[in-house]
Amino acid sequence: MTAILVSLVIGIPWIGALILWRTSDEAPRLQHTLAVAFSIAAGLSSLALLPYATSNTVIDIPMGSVFGNLTFTPDGLAVTLTIIACVIGSLAVIFSVDYMKGEAQLSRYYAFVLLFIGAMAGLVLSGSILFMFFFWEITALCSYALISFYNDDPKAVAGGIKALIITQVGGVGLLAGALITYATLGSYQISDLINNTESMPANLLGLIAFGFLLAAAAKSAQFPFHTWLPDAMEAPTPISALIHAATMVNAGVYLLARFYPAFVHVPGWALSVTIVGLISALITAFMALTATDLKRALAYSTVSQLGYMVYAIGVGGFFASQFHLLSHAVFKALLFLAAGAVIHAAGTRDMRRMGALGRQMPFVRNVFILGALALMGLPILNGFWSKELILEMGLTHGPLWAYVGMLLVAGMTAFYTLRMTWLVFFGKAREALHVHETGIAMKISLGLLAIGTFTTWLLAGPFSHMLQQTLVFHSVTELTTLELVEEILFTPATYGALAVVTLGLGIFWLGRKQAAVGKEARFDILSRESFGFEWLNRQVTSLTLQAGSALQKTQTGKLNWNVMGILGALLAVLAFLLWSA
Amino acid sequence: MTLDPLNAVLIGVILLLAVGFYGLLITRNLIKIVLVLQILVKAVVIALVLAGKASGQPGLGQSIAATVIVADTIVAVVALALAVQVRIRFGTLDLSKISSLRG
C-alpha cells in the first residue's frame, strides 16, 4: 500500500506533465482542468501517505552496479515535505487558473509545474543519495524553465540562467558527496552513510559534509549564493510561491536536516552552518528594508527566513527548523500568492506606485495581513510559534552573538513586513491604479492558505510524534502542542523577541511618512548590489568570457599544432606514470 | 651483445610510431597525411602481433591485427576519396589553406 502511494505521489504529476506537454494550446480550458485534476490527485495521494509514514524502505529496485539501488523511504520528514510540495503545488496550480488566464503556451507552463511537483516529492522520498541528486537536478531544471517562462523578456532569461548556474555549482557538491560515499562504502544509501560515519576516514566525511553544505547553500539561496533568488522573481507569481518560497528552496534545509546526525561531529560543520544561516538572514533582511519591488522584497524575506532554518540546524534545533519550514511554506506561499493577486490587478510590481489598494481588494488585503503577521512572528499565527522555538533553541544551545544577530533580524523582519503591507494596501493612493477584486480560483487558494496560517502550528504535537516515531537517526524529543505552547509562553526569550519585533514595528510607524518617498536611501546601493555579491557575480561572468577569448587563440585549426598538443599531453602522461612508478 | 627478438620488434614499432608522428607534425599535404597515418597504423598492427606473442595468446593478437588491417584499408580508401573531392572543390591539397576551424 505504502509503495503504491509513493509511486502515485511521484507518478501522477509526471504522467500529468507528459499529458499536459502534448495538449494543444488552442484548448486552454482543457489544460487548466487537466492540470488542476492531476495536481489535486497528487495532493490527495500525498495526504493519504501521512498515516503510512515509516522508517522502512518501501521500494527497492536494483539499477545495476553503477547506480546502486533506487530506494524510497517515506519517513516523517520525507512525508511532511512531500505533502508541502503536493498540496501547496495544487493550490498554486488552482491559483494559476486565474493568474495565467489568456497566457500563451500553457502546455509548457503546466508540464513543468507538474514535473517539478513530482521531482520534489522524489527528492525528499529518495533513500539513495545518487537518485536524490537526480531529482535535485530535475527541480533545478524546472526552476530554470519556469523562471524563464516569459522567454521573450531578456531579464527573465538572464534570471533563469543565473539561477541554473548557481544551483549547478551547489549540485557539484551533492554529486561529489554521493560519489565519495559510494567510493568508501560501496553504497549510495543515506542510511548506510549515517550508520557508518564512525568507520569513515575523517577527511572524507568532512569533504562530504562541506560538499553538502555547499549544495544546500546554493539551493536555498544562502550566503554567499543569495543573489539568484531575487532575480528569479521574473517568474510568474504562482511559480515564485511554489518553487521559490514553499518547496524547492527548502531542499537545501532538508538536505542539512536529513544528514545532520552524520555530520554533527565533523569539526566546524555545525558552526559553519550557524554562520551561513546568520549571515544570510542578516544581510537579506537588510536588503529587504529598502526594496521597492514587492516580489523582490518577499524574495529577500524568504532568504532571511531560510537563514533562520539553517541557523536552527546549526545550533541543533532539528525539529525547530522543520517546524519553521512547515510554517514558512504556508505563510510565504500565502504572501506570494496574495502579492500575485495584487500584481495581477495593478499591473506593476513597484510598491512606490501602489498605495491604498486595500479598499478595492479587501479580501487580498486581509489574507496578506495574516501572512504578514505570521512573517513578523506575532501570536498566535504559525510563524510565531516556530520562530520563537528557533530563537529559544538558539539562546539555549547556540553562541550568544548568533542569537543577538537573529534577534536583530526579527526586528528588521517586523520593520520591512509592515513597510510592505503599508506601502501596498494603506496610506495614500499614489497613482490611480485601476484594480479589481480577485477571481474565485485565486480566492480558493488564498483562503485555504490563510486557514493554514492560523492552524498549522496546532500540528506541532502530531508532527513531532511522527518524526520521533519514524526517524531512526535523529533524536527528536516528542512534544505535544500544549507543551510547546507552555514552553514558549513561559520563556523570557519569547518576550524579548516580541519586544524587538514591537520595536521594529514602532520604528517604521514613526517614519511611515518617509516610506514611499522615491529618493534614494543612503544604503540603497548596498542593497541593490547585494553587499558586493552582484559585483562578484559579474566578475565571475566576465572572467569566464575573458578566459574563453584568451583560450580561443589555441584553436588554430591547424592539424600539425593539434597533433603536437596530443603528443605533448601523451608524453606528459607517460612521464608522470614513469615518475610516479 | 644479443638482442631479444621481441625487444627488436618493439624498437621497430617505436621507430615506426616516431616516423608517423613526425610526419603528422610537419605534413600539410592531405595525400601525405593519409600515407603517414598508414605508417602509424602499420606500427599498431605490428604492436598487436607482438602483444599477442608476448602475452602468450598469439592467435588473439593476430586475429585482431587482421581485423585492424581490414578496417584500416577502408579508412584509407575513404580518406583518399575525400582527398580527391577536396582537390576538386578547393583546388588545393594544402591543409592550412582549406582549414576553416579557426578560433
Image: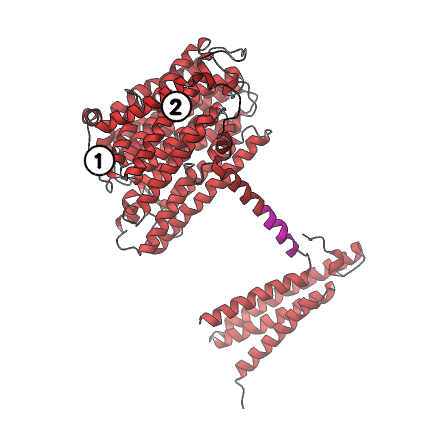
- From the image, which quarter does the C terminus of chain A lie in? bottom left
Marks 2, 1: nearer the viewer = 2
Q: Report the magenta residues as a range.
A: A545-558
Query: Along the line of sight, which residue is nearer the eye, A484 or A468?
Result: A484
**Amino acid type shown at disc 1:** Gln
Q: Tell me where residue A86 appears, x and y as whole percent.
A: 38, 28
Observer able to see residue A33: no
Query: Along the line of sight, which residue is nearer the eye, A68 or A492?
Result: A492
**Which chain is mark 2 on?**
A
Q: Tell me where residue A129 appears, x and y as whole percent.
A: 36, 45
SS under mark 1: helix
Q: Which residue is mark 2?
A: A415
In the figure, is residue A462 to the left or right of A218?
A: left
Examine the structure image and report whether residue A340 is included in the region drawn in magenta: no
SS under mark 2: helix
Q: In the image, is residue A77 above or below residue A501?
A: below
Q: Residue at x 49, y 39 (%)?
A: A533
- From the image, which quarter does the N terminus of chain A lie in? top left
Observer able to see residue A490: yes
In the figure, is residue A214 to the left or right of B52?
A: left
Q: In the image, is residue A302 above or below residue A453?
A: below
Q: Residue furthest top?
A: A359
Q: Tell me where residue A254 appears, x and y as whole percent.
A: 34, 37
**Which chain is mark 1 on?**
A
Q: Which residue is mark 1?
A: A468
Where is residue A332, by image quadrant? top left
Tell me the crowding category of disc 1: few under 14, some 14 to 19, or many 20 or more residues within 10 angstroms, Cα based.
Answer: many
